[in-house]
Image (cartoon, rainbow, N blue to C red):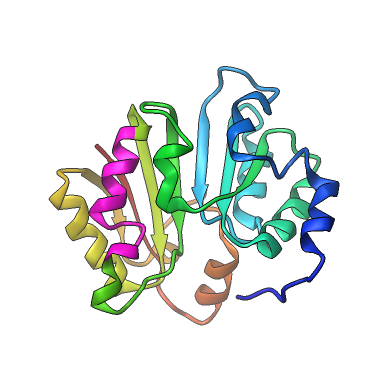
Amino acid sequence: MRIRKKSNVNEKLLDYNDIVIAADDWRKNFSNENEKIFVELGTGKGDFISQLAEINSKINFIGLEMEATVIYAAARKIREKNLSNVRLIIFDINSIEELFNENEIDRFYINFCDPWPKKRHAKRRLTNIKFLEKYKKILKLDGEIQFKTDNRDLFDYSLEQFELINAKVSEVTYNLHDENFPDNIETEYEKKFSAMGVPINRCVIKF
């Protein structure tokens, strides 16, 4: 679900500098101090994180996204909902250990990430053990990752990677929408694929 690039997006983002912040400023940009911190890796156009933050006002949310045009769309949703507990950062997840300290984050969300289907690109998958080792250091001892994807091959690959790092995997489902899961919040991609009848895979990971 692509969004057309806007040539003046960086200028437009200046109107959202209370939401889209610099990477080194995030700790001083929340009104909810000493609260839990949930991070979405690849926040897209913001449907998921804005809905989640709206019903969890005492939790601080951070959305990471590389594409400025996409983050602009997310920032607009957050502004429309008048959310003070969400911040967005234009950031490359490959360097996530430079953004967060050890034992700092309570939860990561990985929703419908790029499956990088070619074997030679496996290390780019956000559930590759290279990334998992970084998440493990950053998560608190009782922290977790919630992972959703429509791609069954990526899901099976990810389960293998979780086993390699001795992670505890729970709530495994290969068809989320056929189960009674009332707290599920759909992303843009999830709405699109579920409407096409594509099963949604989901699990929770702890280290």
Who is closer to the viewer here, 154 or 102?
A: 102
Pick whichever, 1 or 186, lies toward us.
1
Residue 151, percent across and down? 36, 73
Q: Residue at the location (36% across, 28% down)?
A: 102
Q: 122 and 108: which one is in front?
A: 122
Image spot of residue 106 (x, y percent): 43, 31
The relative height of residue 143 versus residue 183 in the rendered view (above or below) is: above
Q: Residue at x 34, y 41 (%)?
A: 135
Q: Main secondary structure of the magenta part?
A: helix
- Quarter of the image for residue 119 reads bottom left
- Please count the marks in the image: 0
User: How far from the left and from the top, in percent, is residue 8?
Assistant: 82, 65
Position of the C terminus, as image quadrant, is: top left
Asked if the magenta segment contains residue 41, the reply would be no
Say left or right for 20 vs 34. right
Decide if residue 74 is on the left or right side of residue 163: right
Q: Which residues are magenta?
A: 123-137
Q: Residue, x 68% and y 28% (percent of image)?
A: 29
Give percent across and percent down for residue 107: 43, 37
Q: Residue at x 78, y 62 (%)?
A: 9
